[in-house]
Amino acid sequence: GGDAPCGCGGKGHLETLAAADAIERKARARGLPPDAEALWKRRDEEGPGAIWEETLDLLARGIASIVHLLDPEAVVLGGGMSRAEGLVEALQRRVEPCLASPLKGRVPLVAASLGDDAALLGAASLAVGMLRKEEEDV
């Protein structure tokens, strides 16, 4: 539940409730194979469907809260499951009813185009920028 431990040392974060690890933990507890990608492909079946209903609901509410707080132009979803066929669209349909009227239809959800390397490439870009600034200052 909401007290599940997170890899960061905290507990109850959205990731602990709705990321691939959480989906696989829920599947294991229900006697289903702990494979989030395979469960997504079987989402029309009763067992996997119930897990995905809960997961998409949690994610949609979390994303809507973030949108209300930060008013972004878009929400970029990362991680392996973000590239699962139809997941972003299914999540977008769930986020919309959770948004205040002025935000409806205004904030697209998109899968990260850089995949799992996004953080590494972002850090490298910052490092290069800092090196260039140091060279300019010399």
Image (cartoon, rainbow, N blue to C red):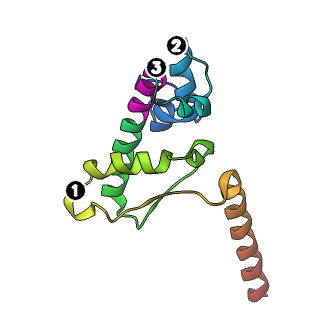
Among the two numbered marks 2 and 1 on one chain, the one whose residue lies closer to the N terminus: 2
120 sits left or right of 109 in the view = right
Of residue 118 and residue 2, the one placed in the foreground of this image is: 118
Residue linked to disc 1: 100
Residue interval drawn in magenta:
46-55
Residue linked to disc 2: 29
11 sits left or right of 106 in the view = right
Q: Which residue is located at x 41 percent, y 61 percent?
A: 108
Separation of disc 2 and disc 1 at Cα?
Answer: 35 Å
Q: Which residue is located at x 79 percent, y 84 percent?
A: 135
Q: Is residue 49 magenta?
A: yes
Separation of disc 3 and disc 2 at Cα?
Answer: 11 Å
- List x then y, in percent, for residue 77: 52, 52
Q: Which residue is located at x 41 percent, y 46 percent?
A: 91
Mark whose residue sits in front, 1 or 3: 3
Q: Amino acid at mark 3?
A: Gly
SS at mark 3 in the image: helix
Q: Amino acid at mark 1?
A: Ala
Residue linked to disc 3: 47
Report the disc number at residue 30: none
Among the two numbered marks 1 and 3 on one chain, the one whose residue lies closer to the N terminus: 3
Is 121 located above or below residue 46 in the figure?
below
Q: Which residue is located at x 71 percent, y 55 percent?
A: 117
- List x then y, in percent, for residue 88: 48, 50
Quadrant where the N terminus sits is: top left
Quadrant where the C terminus sits is: bottom right
- List x then y, in percent, for residue 2: 40, 26
**Cβ–Cβ under 8 Å for marks 1 and 3:** no
